[in-house]
């Protein structure tokens, strides 16, 4: 019989075996140490914690007990923090043809999830989300809805239904899943930094526009 501990991770409550808790705590401490000196480190760490909680919830649900096997599985999925230090410099840069072929194969094997993308939307983000999910240009999806509207009249109804039933990609993990990208430490860090940079650039553009008006 193993002793179980009750823990709280970003809104989720789990029972976790003592040896599993020791391993998880050490891994999270290593992750925190990796990012605590960075400007966006706190946000990166919170999103990593959120993903850990989501993975545990998917494996054991609300009533199950997180074992050492589940913790090892999550760490294998997410990766070790030190694996991403200077990872780009350590790799030999492949040719453009090799990169394209490798990327195509990787993306074809990833499991995408269908979410609405309201960050890059025109209306409800359905077409953009479907484009990510199917791996095609969202313009083609929009043309499909237009043709369905003109030829049969049911385009708006289908779009409205999809808008209602399809969840919006809110978290960093969901946005990565939407694009078929692995949800690991490296990609979470990259996505957060890109989002912050996008917000900064948008703010600067808005300020410049306001200054021109005055």
Image: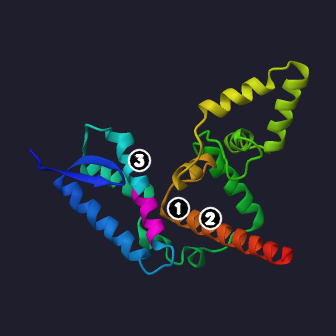
Q: In the structure shown, which secondary structural element does the residue marked by tag 3 occupy? A: helix
The answer to whether 175 appears left or right of 134 in the picture is: left
Q: Residue 195 carries which label?
A: 2
Is 54 on the left-hand or right-hand side of 110?
A: left
Between residue 144 and residue 163, name the one nearer to us.
163
Residue 106 on image: x %, y %: 63, 51
Res 128 → quadrant: top right
Mark 3 and mark 1: span between their CA atoms?
A: 14 Å
Image quarter (top left, top right, bottom left or bottom right) of the C terminus: bottom right
Badge 2 or badge 3: first in the primary sequence: 3
SS label for mark 1: helix
Badge nearest the viewer, 2 or 1: 2
For the N terminus, give its image quadrant.
top left
Q: How far apart are marks 2 and 3 (CA)?
A: 21 Å
Q: Nearer the viewer, mark 2 or mark 3?
A: 2
Nearer to the camera, 158 or 71: 158
Q: Mark 3 points at which residue?
A: 54
| Discs 3, 1 touching: Cβ within 8 Å | no
56 relative to 170 in the view: left or right: left
Q: Where is residue 206 in the image (x, y as percent from the top left)?
A: 75, 70
- Measured as percent of width and height from the top left, residue 213 is found at 85, 73
Q: In this view, does 7 lie to the left or right of 119?
A: left
Q: How crowded is mark 3: few (under 14 residues within 10 Å), some or many (20 or more)?
A: some
- Asked if residue 175 is among those painted magenta in the image, a careful observer would answer no
Residue occupying the point 33% across, 38% down: 61
């Amino acid at each position: 019989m193993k002793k179980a501990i009750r823990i709280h991770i970003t809104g989720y409550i789990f029972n976790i075996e003592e040896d599993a808790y020791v391993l998880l705590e050490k891994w999270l401490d290593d992750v925190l140490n990796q990012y605590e000196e960075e400007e966006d480190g706190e946000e990166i760490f919170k999103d990593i914690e959120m993903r850990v909680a989501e993975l545990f919830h998917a494996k054991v649900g609300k009533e199950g007990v997180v074992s050492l096997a589940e913790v090892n599985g999550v760490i294998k999925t997410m990766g070790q923090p030190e694996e991403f230090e200077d990872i780009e410099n350590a790799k030999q840069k492949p040719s453009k043809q090799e990169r394209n072929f490798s990327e195509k194969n990787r993306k074809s094997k990833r499991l995408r999830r269908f979410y609405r993308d309201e960050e890059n939307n025109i209306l409800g983000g359905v077409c953009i989300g479907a484009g990510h999910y199917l791996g095609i240009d969202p313009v083609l999806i929009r043309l499909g809805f237009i043709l369905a509207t003109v030829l049969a009249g049911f385009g708006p109804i289908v779009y409205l239904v999809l808008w209602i039933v399809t969840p919006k990609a809110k978290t960093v993990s969901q946005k990565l899943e939407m694009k078929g990208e692995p949800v690991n430490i490296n990609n979470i860090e990259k996505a957060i930094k890109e989002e912050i940079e996008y917000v900064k650039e948008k703010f600067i553009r808005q300020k410049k526009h306001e200054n021109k008006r005055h």
